[in-house]
Structure formats: C-alpha cells, structure tokens
Amino acid sequence: MPLPNSKNKFLKYRFMNSSPYLRPYMPETRWMTALSFQQMLTKYKKVIVKPVGGSRGQGVFQVSALGNHLYEVHIENRKYKVRGKRQAFALIKRQVGARGYMVQRCISRADINGRPFDMRVIVQRKTNSPDWVVTAKVAKVAGSGYIVSNIERSKGTILPVGTALRHSSLKGHSPHLLQKNLDRVALRSTFKLKELFPEHRIYGFDLALDRHGRVWIIEGNLFPSRSHFRKLEDKTMLRRINAYKLG
Ligand SMILES: Nc1ncnc2c1ncn2[C@@H]1O[C@H](COP(=O)(O)OP(=O)(O)O)[C@@H](O)[C@H]1O
Ligand SMILES: [Mg+2]
C-alpha cells in the first residue's frame, strides 16, 4: 500500500503538531510566503527555511537577524549578508524558484567545539508486534562551516550519543537523563505517526537538543538510512536494526 504523503515535511509537521503530547517539542513552522517569512524572522530572529519535499539537507537555509536591519543567509558553507527582510526573502526566492518551502523556528542547538549537532533516533517494531523500541541512536555533528548535520552533505561526523554529550556544551547535564528524554520524545512521535502509517515498522527521527538541554523534533523520516550506524566502529546498533527489520 502506498504511504500517504510520507515525504511531505509540512503535512507531517501539521499532523504531529496536532498532538498535545508533541506540540511542546515542535518548533513553530509555517508555509513559506513573504509574509510568514518576515513574521517568523521578527518573532524568532533566526529561522530555518527548507524544502517541503527535501531530503539529505538539500536546499536548507538559515537566516539570522544581525541587528541594524542586516541579515545573514547561510546555505551549505556559504554566507551572504543582505539589508532588510525583503532582500533576504528575494535572495532565497531566486535560489528556490517555485518549489514548496516552509519556514521554521531555528533551534539554537548544543554544539561540540562550535559545531552544532543533532540526533538520529531509530524506533522499530517487529512484524505483528505492537511493541515499539528505540533500537539505535547516534549524534550527527555538522561539518565545519555548515548548519545541516546531514553527514554526506556537510562532511560531518557521527558519534555515539553518550560521547557527543560528554564532549558538548551540555556536559553539565546528565547524559542519562538527556538520552531518556530523547527516547521518550521519539516514542511519543512514533505513537502519533503510526496513526497515519499503521503498517509501518520503522521511523528515524531527527531530534535536537538546545543549549538548555531541551528536546526538539526536527523531523520524522519513514525511510531512515542505516549508513550512520555502519560508520560506527561498534556494530551493535546496526545489528539490532537489522534484527528488527527481519523480525
Ligand atoms: N529548525 C531547525 N533548527 C536547527 N537546525 C535545523 C532545523 N531544521 C533543520 N535543521 C538542520 O538541518 C538538517 C536538515 O533538516 P531536515 O529537516 O532534517 O531535512 P532533511 O530531510 O534534508 O534531512 C537537520 O538535520 C538539522 O541539522
Ligand atoms: Mg533530516
């Protein structure tokens, strides 16, 4: 059975945001128009603009207010400075054309030596089993000069989550508690998404931790790549993912 709108980030956002259990973890997101872009930028000072049908970190912009009506538009490892929100919008519009885009509050993520990171958390169930389990998770550290943590695109680094947390700006927080919160939010997200995709058995969530250690949901993927886990020296998580796939 084909999955309804499984690649449309905006529909998935709206669906997840309709859950009172998930709303506190969802960064506010709107369909991108000149008006919504300006309003979100005024409200949050820093926004992410990304394609509704995108993947692998392609076409993701970060726009920051620098003060004095100056704005920085950051895409890939390039940064542009422009004057005024209209110019910022025009610059993005020139690059994206008619593609559907959304504008989202930018989460000030925890970092490791100035490089932001977020987590990929895999949740699975076995065939005919109702029990969902977090089978694997890794930290994806953005490559130098990039905002997206997608590893191929930004030439970033994969780390075990515990290692990442211990070396990060969150080292004062309990790694155990942070990981527990990540697992809880991933499972809650699964319980919501499974309403839309009842037959589906695997999800991969991009979850961010902000500078205060709070969890945010960046997106839910229905076809998460296993490549992150192949890169780790310890293959335990990869084996568990595969066992659940076959199970
Ligand atoms: N709201 C946000 N705040 C901070 N970083 C973000 C935000 N949205 C996306 N990112 C960064 O960009 C990456 C790519 O965005 P994502 O929504 O996961 O799309 P894709 O399908 O391209 O992976 C994320 O993994 C994260 O590193
Ligand atoms: Mg992603």
Image (cartoon, rainbow, N blue to C red):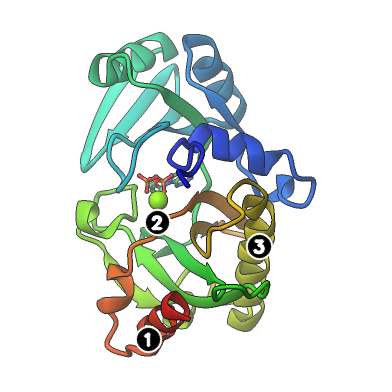
In the picture, residue 60 is in which quadrant?
A: top left
Which is nearer the eye, 131 or 27?
A: 131
Instruction: Determine the secondary structure under disc 1.
Output: helix
CA distance for labels 3 and 1: 23 Å
Closer to us: 220 or 74: 220
Which quadrant of the structure image shows residue 235? bottom left
Query: Which-is-in-front pick, marks 3 and 2?
Result: 2
Where 222 falls versus 18 (above or below)? below
Nearer-N-terminus badge (3/2): 3
Q: Nearer the viewer, residue 203 or 78?
A: 203
Name the kind of residue labelled 2 in the image. Phe
Q: Residue 218 appears at what percent x and percent y?
A: 51, 49
Q: Which residue is mark 1?
A: 239
Q: CA distance from mark 3 to mark 2?
A: 19 Å
User: Is residue 99 visible to us here?
Assistant: yes
Q: Do labels 1 and 2 touch, CB within 8 Å?
A: no
Would residue 214 be seen by someone viewing this image from the given angle? no
Labelled pair 3, 2 in contact (Cβ < 8 Å): no
Q: Residues within 10 Å of mark 3 (few under 14, many from 20)?
A: many
Between disc 3 and disc 1, whose residue precedes? 3
Q: Amino acid at mark 1?
A: Arg
- Badge number at residue 185: 3
At x 34%, y 47%, the residue is 147
- Per the model, the C-alpha gap separating discs 1 and 2 is 17 Å
Looking at the image, residue 174 sits to the left or right of residue 9; the answer is: right
